Image (spheres, rainbow, N blue to C red):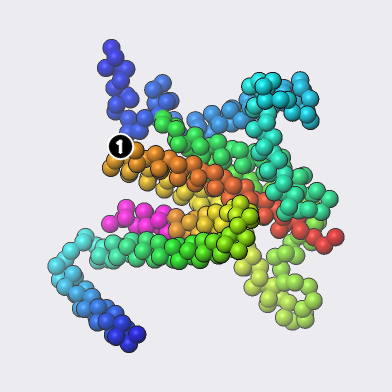
Amino acid sequence: MLLEMAKPVLAAETFTWWGLLGYEDVPFYMIMGWVVTALLVFVSLLVNVSLKKGDPVVPKAPADMGLLDWVRHLFEMVVETMVELLDSLMPHHHEGRGYAWLIIPIFLYILINNLMGLAPGFEPATSNANTNFAVAITVFVLYNAFGFWKVGPGYARHFWAPPGLPIFIAPVIGLLLLGIELVGHGFRPVTLTLRLFGNMTGDHVAFTTFLGLVPLGVPVIFLMLGLLVCAVQAYVFTLLSSVYITLATSHEH
Amino acid sequence: MKKFAFGVLTVAAVMAMAVPAFAAEGGAGSSNGLFIPIGVGLTLGLAAFASAFGQGRAASAALDGIARNPAAAGKIQVPMILGLAFMEALTIFAWLVARDLVGKI
């Protein structure tokens, strides 16, 4: 009977927790995407409850803290770092924090997805280009929307020639710059997607290769490298998104 | 310098003479099959070299900054890691291309 249960696990190429339950055919990025979303929603609800029950400003002494307070303080660390980053990019009247509702979920989603890939039995959803492209295209559409919202119709001026050129030269330079800007802007979601995809896949391949070579001891170093790469890539994605929003909404005061 | 250039040209000439030899053997399946492995090797080699060069410069600048002002080490470290990640991403794009090329051999 045990052998019957073990057969699908042994037959599968990689071990996954949902493969144990029989769901090998479902794409891993869908399952992992939903798992991470559910986890983040649950943690956010916990933090919400903690903020309503206790004092939102004064922290408790470490001896009095319960699980809810630990979760809340972790969340506050992340929020504080991201708000500081956004405020440093867009300092005018703390304009930066108006975009925290977009930037913090991006950071947490990508970070938790990356980190879950390090655990055995899980596959990071970000190692499939679809997940990354979803976030990248959202950022792309939204930063253009913010540009039009904040700057008005003059945002399209970014793509044409700068004002003040003679009327015969302006269309030529304008068309040239339009081409360059369109390619540059269209390239942004592509690089965002592929950078994260390549890093996660490459990291996984390197780890698997060394696991096949030396099963004991050496892969620990690759897990540590994996931690660094996961955190850095999540931060790079978030930082680039913030910079794109800053560039799109920059206007003379 | 002249000797080095002469040496490189000799090697290139010998390799160019070897190409008809490959064709005469009728080696890899299609007519351009023999260039794909060379392409893969060149892609990854150039990517690794360029990335190492650029990242070395970034790390060198960061180390200079830390040597001048050891108290600012934490503040210098984060932008350095960021710069390294951008250069690493370009190398990984090259690896993605090479991965597809290897599948076509």
| Residue under the point 32% across and 62% down | B41
- Relative to the observer, which residue lies in front, A199 or A28? A199
- Relative to the observer, which residue lies in front, A184 or A169? A184
Does residue B100 show up magenta in the picture?
yes
Whether residue A46 is visible = no
Provide residue B103's location: percent of width, then percent of height: 32, 53
- Segment colored magenta: B93-105
The count of marks equals 1
Does residue B6 show up magenta in the picture?
no
Q: Quadrant of residue B83?
A: bottom right
Provide residue A68's location: percent of width, then percent of height: 66, 22
Provide residue A31's location: percent of width, then percent of height: 49, 30
Provide residue A198's location: percent of width, then percent of height: 46, 50
- Residue B14 relative to residue A123: left or right: left
Q: Residues within 10 Å of mark 1 (few under 14, many from 20)?
A: few
Q: Quadrant of the N terminus of chain A?
A: top left
- To which chain does the residue with label 1 belong? A
Whether residue B92 is visible = yes
Q: Quadrant of residue A118?
A: top left
Q: Is residue B74 above or below residue A167?
A: above
**Majority SS type along the magenta span:** helix
Q: Is residue A176 above or below residue B91?
A: below
| Residue under the point 56% across and 52% down | A192
Q: Quadrant of the C terminus of chain A?
A: bottom right
The amino acid type found where label 1 is placed reads: Pro
- The residue identified by callout 1 is A215
